[in-house]
Amino acid sequence: MMTSRYRVGLTADGAAPDGTTIFGDIGLDRLIAAGMEWEVMPPVVGSVPPAEVIGRYDAVLSLGHLHFPRELAVAAPRLRHISRFGAGHDGIDLGGLAEHGVVVTNTPLAVRRPLAVGALTLLLALSHRLMANHRAATSGRWAERGRYRGAGLSGRTVGIVGLGGVGSDLAGLVAPLGRFSVRNTAVFS
């Protein structure tokens, strides 16, 4: 009896038909080198991929925020692995899928540093009023540049809500910019 090759479906919410993604190179060549096939799945209408589509794959690499309920594992018995590109398992029924032999993984380290760097970039842009200065300069209002002086971060308090992976990484990036203390405080409303 001949078995088909291991097939991986990439969700269309983050991939072009040629496999390029909004995340850059995600190592699809390693799948081919391991004797696997991959393809970009058809776009999903709604938040749950249809079982008839999921049923074509042994594994799904979710590049966005699709939902994977227990019912998909029942209707698509070939499915054995769902990997969410990013942190968290929002919208994924971990227990229900596990009951049907579907392993669920994620890649939190792939997004941790880019999110922390993005937060630092916004923090610096806001503290220096970069966008207001940019708008004044590009519209030729040079005389107004003094109105948009930023405060910078020196002597300021930087608050980070949540010191999980991204928050901790952000704290490490901010630390060399001044004298900051990191305090983990839980606030509940």
Image (cartoon, rainbow, N blue to C red):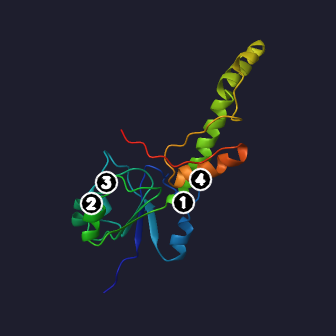
Q: Nearer the viewer, mark 3 or mark 2?
A: 3
Gap in Å between the C-alphas at discs 3 and 2?
9 Å
Q: Dot 1 surroundings within 10 Å: few (below 14), some, or many (20 or more)?
A: few
Gap in Å between the C-alphas at discs 4 and 1?
11 Å
Question: In the rendered image, which quarter contains the N terminus?
Answer: bottom left
Question: In the rendered image, which quarter contains the C terminus?
Answer: top left
Q: Is residue 129 above or below residue 111?
A: above
For marks 3 and 4, the one nearer the N-term is 3
Place of residue 132 in the rendered image (x, y in percent of width and height, measured from the top left)? 66, 22
In front here: 174 or 11?
Answer: 174
Residue at (59, 48) in percent of width and height: 182
Place of residue 100 in the rendered image (x, y in percent of width and height, measured from the top left)? 25, 70
Mark 1 residue element: helix
Q: Is residue 139 above or below residue 75?
A: above
Mark 4 residue element: helix
Place of residue 7 in the rendered image (x, y in percent of width and height, measured from the top left)? 40, 70
Residue hosting label 1: 109
**Numbered mark located on residue 52 in the image:** 2
Q: In the displayed structure, does residue 44 sit left or right of residue 73? A: right
For marks 3 and 1, the one nearer the N-term is 3
Gap in Å between the C-alphas at discs 2 and 1?
32 Å
Residue hosting label 4: 169
Q: In the displayed structure, does residue 136 sit left or right of residue 13? A: right
User: Amino acid under label 3?
Assistant: Pro
User: Amino acid under label 2?
Assistant: Glu
**Numbered mark located on residue 49 in the image:** 3
Picture quadrant where residue 59 is located: bottom left
Q: Dot 4 surroundings within 10 Å: few (below 14), some, or many (20 or more)?
A: some
